[in-house]
Image: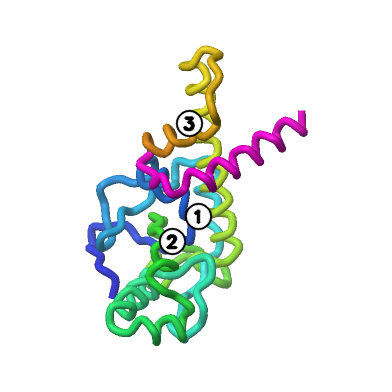
């Protein structure tokens, strides 16, 4: 079973992009933890409440590959299983330690909408539906890149028109948000693509 306390909020686990992990912890996590992972709070992000009110699904424990999200029960069982027998867990669930590390615990509402429109308390077996998880991923991606854009604007103002490499800006963003510098090349490439697309739309 996952390590939780009755005082902790309900959570479900969402898969996120590895280079967003540092920013998520820096910007969206408080002191509450599930095991050694800090709980992510998204309710204040625009559109998050509507997504969290969407219909959820029950995450039964039959062996199957994990998709975009999983319940607290499944995450706890897979985590324990990887300690006991990683090979079996990978065969049954398609998960190894690296894959599991991409999932973060999202704070969920006290009540959830189930199939048939029934409201009931969110429990350890409740999971985001595929549509819900996909929309939450999109919400977090947009919030992340908006944070990068705001940092880039501030960086440009601080340099007062001086020439600087985009990589320097990305490296400073990573330092500020405690993002591992191993992600700098991927972040720089994606940022340049986004800047180019934005320029084409103008």
Majority secondary structure in the magenta region? helix
Element type where label 2 sits in the image: loop
What residue does disc 3 label? Answer: 168
What residue does disc 1 label? Answer: 17
Query: Do residues under tags 3 and 2 come within 8 Å of each other at their CB atoms?
Result: no
Q: Is residue 81 above or below residue 136?
A: below
In this picture the colour scheme is rainbow
Residue 136 is left or right of residue 61, and the answer is right
Q: Magenta includes 146?
A: no
Q: Which of the numbered marks, if any, corresponds to residue 102?
A: 2
Residue 127 is left or right of residue 110, and the answer is right
Residue, x 49% and y 56% (percent of image)? Answer: 16
Query: Do residues under tags 1 and 3 come within 8 Å of each other at their CB atoms?
Result: no
Residue 131 drawn at (x, y percent)? 60, 62
Mark 3 and mark 2: Cα distance apart in space: 26 Å
Q: Earlier in the sequence, mark 3 or mark 2?
A: 2
Q: Is residue 31 above or below residue 70?
A: above
Residue, x 55% and y 66% (percent of image)? Answer: 129
The image shows a total of numbered marks equal to 3
Q: Magenta includes 196?
A: yes
Q: Earlier in the sequence, mark 1 or mark 2?
A: 1
Mark 1 and mark 2: Cα distance apart in space: 7 Å
Q: Which residues are magenta?
A: 177-202
Closest to the observer, 130 or 142: 142
Q: Which of the numbered marks, if any, corresponds to residue 54?
A: none
Closest to the observer, 93 or 128: 93
Residue 193 drawn at (x, y percent)? 66, 41
Element type where label 1 sits in the image: loop
Element type where label 3 sits in the image: helix
Residue 148 drawn at (x, y percent)? 51, 35
Query: Do residues under tags 1 and 2 come within 8 Å of each other at their CB atoms?
Result: yes
């Amino acid at each position: 079973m996952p390590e939780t306390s009755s005082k902790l909020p309900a959570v479900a686990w969402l898969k996120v992009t590895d280079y967003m992990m540092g920013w998520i912890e820096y910007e969206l996590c408080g002191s509450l933890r599930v095991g050694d992972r800090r709980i992510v709070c998204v309710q204040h992000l625009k559109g998050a409440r509507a997504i969290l009110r969407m219909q959820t699904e029950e995450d039964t424990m039959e062996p199957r590959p994990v998709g975009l999200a999983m319940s607290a029960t499944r995450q706890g069982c897979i985590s324990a299983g990887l300690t006991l027998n990683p090979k079996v867990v990978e065969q049954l669930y398609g998960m190894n330690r690296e894959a599991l590390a991409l999932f973060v615990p999202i704070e969920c509402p006290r009540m959830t909408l189930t199939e048939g429109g029934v409201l009931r308390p969110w429990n350890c077996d409740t999971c985001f539906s595929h549509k819900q998880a996909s929309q939450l991923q999109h919400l977090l991606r947009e919030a992340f890149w908006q944070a990068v854009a705001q940092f880039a604007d501030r960086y440009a103002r601080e340099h007062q028109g001086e020439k600087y490499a985009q990589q320097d800006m990305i490296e400073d963003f990573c330092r500020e948000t405690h993002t591992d510098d191993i992600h700098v090349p991927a972040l720089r490439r994606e940022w340049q693509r986004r800047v180019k697309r934005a320029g084409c739309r103008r």
